[in-house]
Image: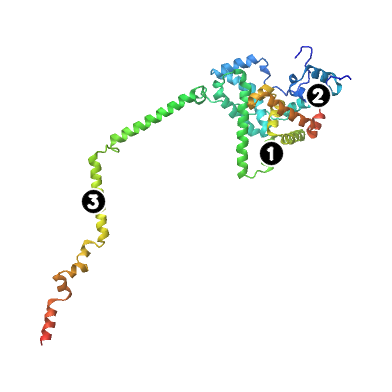
């Protein structure tokens, strides 16, 4: 890329919860210490990524209680396995992959349970119960309903790539490492998902209202 | 005839610039930046996507529970290379337990060495048992009943005849006849 072409400054990055690791070498050093058995170093990693992993899980299962449990499991698994992480720079995708596997396991078990149990809408919405009293409950509900409708209309691969890029804030390279697919495949899924997002009127209108 | 080689407005290129602007040629990037239609299209789409991520974060709850890590350091199971060591250790331990159990049973007499004599004795006992079974099949009555069976009576068992037809009545019968 020639230097005379300036990069456009429109950001699509969501909120970064792990802002303290802007310098990748800080994160790599901490991961190395944790991998060598430094418990305090791992606890710092937990403090930095707890919110991100919790949100990542919540976006996929929409239940606060279950997201808390799954996030706990993810960090216990990561604590047990960080010694086997050869390249500290792969910590983020490695952690997200553990989380994604945990979410998929949870959803698989939930589907299996639903064969034998009749879920009511109230039970499924139990995760929202704690926020039903807030003044912006309707706004939130409208947002999640619209997003959920849009995501249900795109393929599973497009959905997961779209979530990882625009909700979790992972880079294309990180998504390819989490998903175990090459970058051009990820870009193809992302392109299709963004194309469909552009045509998605309900969600677009909702976000359009808030745009300057 | 002249061809205008400047890039034209193309929403596909705008989307590609959002997915990964490094994939676009400098000409396309310059066009998207300078073209009011494309740059506005890009601004709106990228803005919506950015807002989507921020709204999702804003409308999600924050974790309330602290993460509790196990007390011990990295569990043995997940240490690098520990899988083979663990498998080998488990196999060796299991083999030791089996050998110890076999030794204890041998010493306690549960398991004794088997000789040819033992085998021959066992065969002789089997043969005797089979002979007894064959005899019972041929003579199903117990021995006591066999003593009074018709075959034996038909032979010359005078005591039984005396019991059925006493000698005194025979005498009387013969005397009457004579009389």
For disc 3, the chain is B
Find the residue positioned furthest to the bottom.
B179
Residue A78 shows in the view? yes
Q: Secondary structure at mark 3?
A: helix
- Residue B142 horizontal/vertical position (percent): 23, 61
Q: Residue furthest front?
A: B1
Q: Are marks 1 and 3 on the same chain?
A: no
Q: Is residue B57 visible?
A: no
Q: Please give left or right for residue A44 compared with residue B21 in the image.
A: left
Do callouts 1 and 2 point to residues on the same chain?
no
Residue A132 lies, in percent from the top left, at: 72, 36
| Residue that appears at 40% across and 28% down | B93
Q: Disc 1 vs disc 3: which is toward the camera?
A: 3
The residues tagged by marks 1 and 3 sit, at their Cα atoms, a distance apart of 80 Å
Residue A9 sits above or below residue A149 on the image:
above
Q: Few, some or many C-alpha atoms within 10 Å of disc 3 (few <14, some 14-19, many ≥20)?
A: few
Residue A170 vs residue B72, the one in the foreground: A170
Asked which secondary structure carries label 2, the reply is: helix
Give the residue pinned by disc 3.
Answer: B128
Q: Residue furthest right?
A: B1
> Nearest the camera: B137 or B146?
B137
Mark 2 crowdedness (10 Å alpha carbons): few <14, some 14-19, many ≥20 = many
Can you identify the residue that label 1 sits on? A125
Disc 2/disc 3 C-alpha distance (Å): 102 Å
Q: Position of residue B46 (x, y in %)?
A: 78, 24
Question: Regarding mark 1 in the picture, which secondary structure is present there?
Answer: helix
Identify the image quadrant of the C terminus of chain B: bottom left
Please tell me which residue is depicted at 26% across the width and 58% down the height of the picture: B136
Give the numbered dot on residue B42: 2
Q: Is residue B170 left or right of residue B99?
A: left
Report, in whole angstroms, how far the alpha carbon at label 1 lies from the one at label 2. 36 Å
């Amino acid at each position: 890329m020639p230097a005379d072409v300036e990069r456009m400054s429109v950001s699509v990055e969501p909120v970064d919860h792990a802002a303290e690791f802007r310098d990748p070498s800080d994160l790599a050093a901490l991961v190395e210490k944790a991998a060598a058995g430094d418990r305090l170093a791992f606890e710092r990693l937990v403090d930095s990524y707890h919110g991100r992993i919790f949100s990542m899980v919540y976006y996929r299962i929409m239940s606060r209680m279950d997201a808390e449990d799954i996030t706990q499991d993810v960090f216990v698994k990561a604590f047990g396995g960080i010694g086997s992480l050869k390249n500290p720079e792969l910590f983020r995708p490695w952690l997200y992959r553990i989380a994604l596997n945990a979410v998929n396991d949870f959803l698989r078990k939930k589907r299996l349970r639903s064969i034998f149990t009749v879920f009511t809408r109230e039970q499924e919405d139990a995760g929202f119960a704690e926020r039903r009293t807030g003044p912006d409950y309707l706004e939130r509900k409208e947002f999640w309903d619209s997003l959920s409708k849009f995501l249900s209309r795109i393929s599973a691969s497009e959905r997961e790539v779209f979530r990882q890029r625009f909700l979790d804030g992972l880079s294309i390279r990180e998504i390819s490492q989490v998903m175990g697919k090459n970058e051009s495949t990820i870009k193809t899924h992302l392109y299709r998902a963004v194309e469909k997002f552009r045509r998605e009127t309900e969600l677009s209108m909702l976000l359009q209202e808030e745009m300057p | 005839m002249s061809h205008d080689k400047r890039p034209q407005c193309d929403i596909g290129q705008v989307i590609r610039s959002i997915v990964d602007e490094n994939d676009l040629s400098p000409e396309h990037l310059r066009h998207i930046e300078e073209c009011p239609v494309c740059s506005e299209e890009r601004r709106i789409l990228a803005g919506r996507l950015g807002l989507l991520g921020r709204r999702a974060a804003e409308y999600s709850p924050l974790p309330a529970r602290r993460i509790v890590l196990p007390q011990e350091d990295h569990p043995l199971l997940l240490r690098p290379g520990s899988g083979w060591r663990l498998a080998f250790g488990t196999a060796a331990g299991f083999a030791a337990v089996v050998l110890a159990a076999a030794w204890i049973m041998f010493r306690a007499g549960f398991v004794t060495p088997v000789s040819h004599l033992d085998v021959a004795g066992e065969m002789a006992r089997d043969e005797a048992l089979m002979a007894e079974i064959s005899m019972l099949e041929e003579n199903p009555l117990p021995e006591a009943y066999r003593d009074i069976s018709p075959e034996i009576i038909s032979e010359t068992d005078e005591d039984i005849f005396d019991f059925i037809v006493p000698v005194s009545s025979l005498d009387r019968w013969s005397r009457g006849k004579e009389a």
